[in-house]
Amino acid sequence: MKLLTTIFQAHQLDSVRTALIETGFSAMTVTSVRGAGVHKGTTATYRGAIYKDEFSDCIQIDLAIEAAQVEKAIEVIRTVISSEEDGVLWVRPLERFIHFHKR
């Protein structure tokens, strides 16, 4: 198994999630994260003082999937995210996956 992790701008969550569900990837973990990189954050002025937030709000999605499904998931995510500057994605080996549920 593999653990696919992608981080992208928060406004793209609905599009990415819908596309993944429509192609059979319904089990996912979605986390709000903050990141720095291409997007430089925001600057605001309040009562004459300048406040700079160097981080931007992002979404992280983790998918635990079979190795054979990795390329399909990557294709779906890359199709939805408009350019390489809008997100990152990486894949790691997942040694063991245990699903807990009531019996």
Image (cartoon, rainbow, N blue to C red):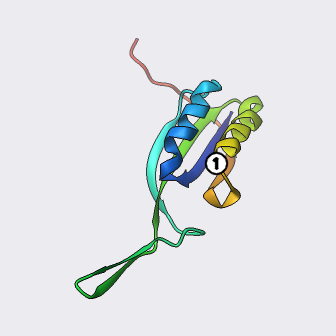
Q: Is residue 56 left or right of residue 23?
A: left
Task: Give the camera-side residue of 64 and 87.
Answer: 87
Residue 60 at what x, y percent from top left?
52, 48
Residue 11 at what x, y percent from top left?
48, 50
Compared with 82, 18 (above or below) is: above
Residue 80 at what x, y percent from top left?
64, 43
Task: For the C terminus, give its image quadrant.
Answer: top left
Q: Is residue 77 left or right of residue 52?
A: right
Task: Give the camera-side residue of 69 and 24.
Answer: 24
Residue, x 69% and y 57% (percent of image)?
A: 84
Compared with 75, 49 (above or below) is: below
> Can residue 96 be seen from the camera position used here?
no
Residue, x 73% and y 30% (percent of image)?
A: 69
> Can residue 1 be seen from the camera position used here?
yes
Residue that badge 1 annotates: 81
Task: Give the camera-side residue of 2 and 42.
Answer: 42
Residue 75 at what x, y percent from top left?
73, 39
Q: Is residue 31 left or right of residue 46?
A: right
Q: Mark 1: which amino acid? A: Ile
User: How many numbered circles does the render carry?
Assistant: 1
Residue, x 53% and y 34% (percent of image)?
A: 28
Farthest bottom residue in view? 48
Residue, x 65% and y 26% (percent of image)?
A: 23
